[in-house]
Amino acid sequence: MRGPWGRWAAVALAALALLGGCGPHGTPARPAAPGSAPAPDSALEVAVSSDFPTLDPAQATDTESIGAIQLMDQPLFTYSDTGALVGLLAQGFAWSNSGTVLTVQLNPGATFADGSPVLATDVVYSIGRLLAKDTASPHASSFQDLEGYAQLREGKAAAGLTASGPRTVVFRLQHALPYLPELLAMPSTAVLEQKVADVPGSAQRAWWFAHSAGSGPYVLASSTPGQSLRLAPSPHYWGQASGGGPFAPVEFRIVSDAATQTRLFAAGQLDVLAPAPPTAFAGGLPPAGARLLEAGNEGVSFLGFDTTRPPFDNPLVRQAVAYALNKPKLLAAAGPGSLAAGLVPPGVPGFDANLAPYPYAPARAQALLAQAGLASGTPVTLLTIAASGTVQQGSSDAMAAQVAKDLDAVGFDVTVQRDTWQEYYRDLAAGRANLFEGTWLADYPDPQDFVFHLLGPGAAGQGPGGYASRAFTPALQAAEAASTSSARLE
């Protein structure tokens, strides 16, 4: 999943709770003051810095959209507060046939927003919709190991995805895939009510801003493009709020300017800033009467290359960039975090603490560029996502400026191009930039989520970078086919 740089910070008024996970394991709520009754009609006002590209689980890749979707729609699995995989709509699961068949039993108490039960046919419909070519989901390739994947892509039934009874779903694989339950915890796999979502018009973006088809604690109440998105408590939610009280409505207000976010927060017109913009920390402290929560994430921020054309089709030039970057200064610009030496972050299996990042060695970078025959002043376009003064949406102006400064110092001529989310992916696909800043947050705690999506065939996660290697690509494919997690990590 694409997301913000480094570590996020959220600031909330002391009398309010912060937005939490959805489902039985935690929900957003507005606790009452001591001795008073809760105010269920009073909305929790949450600031976001850009509009929602989509509310379709199969399409969402940005943090804003996913944050709202997770309150309305639920997948089969989720994670506990300790990071353990647990059932959400799934009550249990079992492997068989040497790890190639996963049988999932649904929670008999789970219901959709209209009170209808969540059934196996809804699961088959939802995953099938995700995989169908007509949906054009960027997440479909994660399930290419299902039997009959080609048929599923054509919108046809296949042995890899079947209902075996009202509340039993069977997944059949071409080979063992130990992390399939983790894949089924991704927001993109949210189970939708077939009779609601399988209708004319649901393929259009606008449909999702007018309808709710999920089983989560919230339903869509209203949407005003460019201004706000309001969610109301679901009248038939089958779970409970973490505090046991009623759910409060949630209003996402789109405020792109960081200073305006801070001013509205200080005036009591916003309850939550997540992540908190730098302007919220005047003098190094959060506003008076606010509560600050910090949380790390299993993610990595990176600088990507278009390796399909000069100058970054040359590995010497890519190595020169690695030596040219002053990484401690980049880290200071990004905010709290640690220097990365590889794609797999701490907390994810496969992280190698013995790896060390490239040292800052501009003279070495210049020597490599000379060896590559690169002319001084070679133009480079660095693509980043407009952050409007916040640390949100995958990059910051400070980091882009530092990258440009470091690369200009060794002989490049860098132009920074700041795009909206939609422009960013359009320009990447069109090859309008040869360098791009990006961030990937774990969809599930497995190295496959990073290595395959960022460097695998098609670079589905963030790119396209076009990277391929006669040694690396076969090794990655062999790891994909390994029958156990330990074998894949070797």
Image: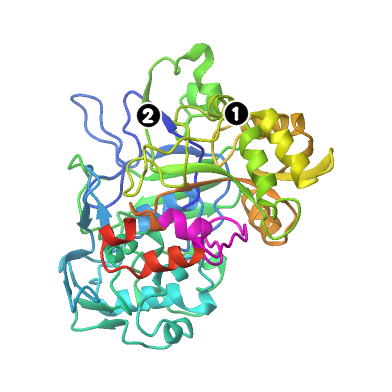
**Foreground residue, 111 or 357?**
357
Disc 1 packing (10 Å; few <14; some 14–19; many ≥20): some
Check the image and report above or below for 63 versus 155: above
State the mark number for residue 226.
none
The quarter holding residue 89 reads bottom left
Which residue is most to the front?
Answer: 371
Disc 2 packing (10 Å; few <14; some 14–19; many ≥20): some
**Foreground residue, 221 or 453?**
453
Whether residue 356 appears in magenta in the rendering, the answer is no
Question: What is the three-letter code of the residue carrying label 2?
Answer: Glu
Percent x, y for residue 168?
19, 77
Question: What is the three-letter code of the residue carrying label 1?
Answer: Tyr
Q: What segment is highlighted magenta in the picture?
A: 449-472
Q: What is the CA distance from the residue labelled 1 to the residue labelled 2?
A: 29 Å
The residue pinned by badge 2 equals 294
State the mark number for residue 360.
1
